[in-house]
Image: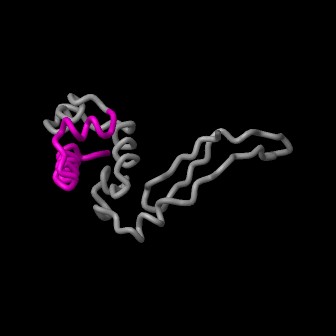
Amino acid sequence: MVNQEDFTKRLRKLLRYYDLSASAFADRIGVQRSSISHLLTGRNKPSLEFVLKVVDTFPEVDLYWLVKGKGNFPLMSAEKDVHTPSPIVKAQNVKIDGNLKSVDKIIILYSNGSFKIYNAD
């Protein structure tokens, strides 16, 4: 479970680090400005969609750090390399239990709780 108060502190740290107002941060990650306001005041808890938008927009933010406060912020360049595998160009069909199945998405789970999703194109 996410500790609301601690999450708010980490969110404020992001705003200071990137020197962004709450509105500019909301615009940058593509959420309504009121969403940030509600998170900062403790009215709402962060949704998974919100958290994923933050880590997708800002590569220095580690998912596990943002949600649980464990790990480092900002990520060092060597750490970023660990969390950013080379892109998967094209997913193929695979045979599972004798049946040919098409790949819809590939999810890579990291030991620190972060993950990366690749959708088949």
Quadrant showing the C terminus: top right
Is 99 situated left or right of 9 in this image? right
Image location of residue 101, percent across then percent down: 77, 39
Magenta-colored segment: predominant secondary structure: helix
Image location of residue 74, percent across then percent down: 29, 62
Residue 12: say if magenta: yes
Image location of residue 34, percent across then percent down: 20, 28
Which quarter of the figure has residue 120? top right
Q: Nearer the viewer, residue 31 or 100?
A: 31
Q: Nearer the viewer, residue 34 or 28?
A: 28
Residue 4: say if magenta: yes
Image location of residue 97, percent across then percent down: 82, 45
Is 66 situated left or right of 117 in this image? left
Which quarter of the figure has residue 78? bottom left
The residue depicted at 19 percent of the width and 32 percent of the height is 38
29 in relation to 81, above or below: above
The residue depicted at 13 percent of the width and 36 percent of the height is 41
Give, as a single range, the part of the protein colored magenta. 1-30
